[in-house]
Image: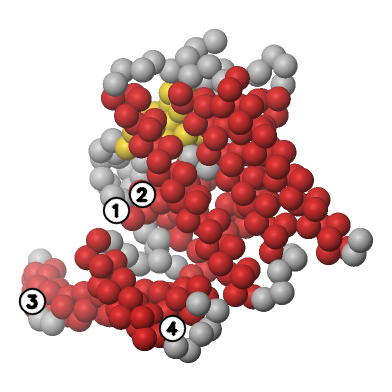
Amino acid sequence: MTPIDFISSALLIAGGVFFLAGTVGLLRFPDVYTRLHALTKGDNVGLGLVIAGLAVQVQSWFTVGKLLMIWVLVMLASASISHLIARRALLRGIKPWKR
Amino acid sequence: MRRRSGSLGCRMSRLSGKGWFNDLMNIHFRSVWFRAVAFTFMWWMLTAGSVNSWLVGAPVVLVATLISMVLVPPFSCSVVGSVRFVPFFIWHSLRGGADVAWRAFHPKMPIAPGLVEFPLRLPPGMSRVFMVNTVSLLPGTLSVELGANRLKVHVLDTRKNVLSELIRLEQIIAKMFNTSLQDAKGDECNEEI
């Protein structure tokens, strides 16, 4: 196992942990707003780490660029869509859960 | 009194001259060039530098630039500010992910959510949209509604002081977009950016 392989697998596993955390948050958190917190932030970091893990393995810079572009586009989409879902929920009168 | 009216007259003549027109064309031309170069770079990267693909790529870049000029009016953006934003953003989104992961895995689920109103000082336009999107990716905050001069933010833990972090984010974004922060009433803020 080369050092590159080691770094890559560490990053990929860490990314998987964040995706898992996002999903656990989606299942455990009490209302739509807190669930959006878990999904946007958990998946953003998870995808970022997975992409970093893949980027250290690839041979060509073009592929690194493509991977980075995927990350930026997914981040843009998830941030805007989570804002739209939260705004719609508030307009519909869904009250945020309080402890 | 006289001197004052003179300087005012001078300013008026400069306004009625071509100065403002040149400024307007400058920012338009600069952003057309910048966007065309950015789309060209993207196409070059997606096709891995293939020469034949430019038969399709050149028209696509042209159309994408035109559509983007119609959909997103030109805005000014500082290169230094944008480069500085990247490490800030990566560090804080890592923190945000770790924070929410910890709360999700914790058996007692330590959250105390609530809504917070944040008075926006960024001018309307691209910088505000950018702020709304960034807030959702930073630790413990989710932008819910963009009002006239305030942003409703859902906070995962109201015991933490998120306002100071939001103010810091706002300052960084203002630097990135070359704008100054203004008070809710519309006066210039005394804070120098």
Q: CA distance from mark 3 to mark 2?
A: 33 Å
Sequence-wise, the earlier of marks 1 and 3 is: 3
Q: Is residue A76 visible from the viewing direction of this image?
A: yes
Q: CA distance from mark 1 to mark 3?
A: 26 Å
Please give the residue where the numbered disc 1 appears in the rendered image.
B125
Q: Quadrant of the C terminus of chain B?
A: bottom left
Asked if both marks, 4 and 3, belong to the same chain, the answer given is yes
Please give the residue where the numbered disc 4 appears in the rendered image.
B53
Q: Is B98 placed left or right of A41 in the picture?
A: right
SS of the residue under disc 1: loop
Q: CA distance from mark 2 to mark 4?
A: 34 Å
Q: Amino acid at mark 1?
A: Gly
Q: Is residue B3 visible from the viewing direction of this image?
A: no
Task: Residue at 21% x, 79% y: name it.
Answer: B25
User: What is the x, y in percent for residue B30?
Assistant: 32, 78
User: What is the x, y in percent for residue B12?
Assistant: 9, 73
User: What is the x, y in percent for residue B57?
Assistant: 38, 80
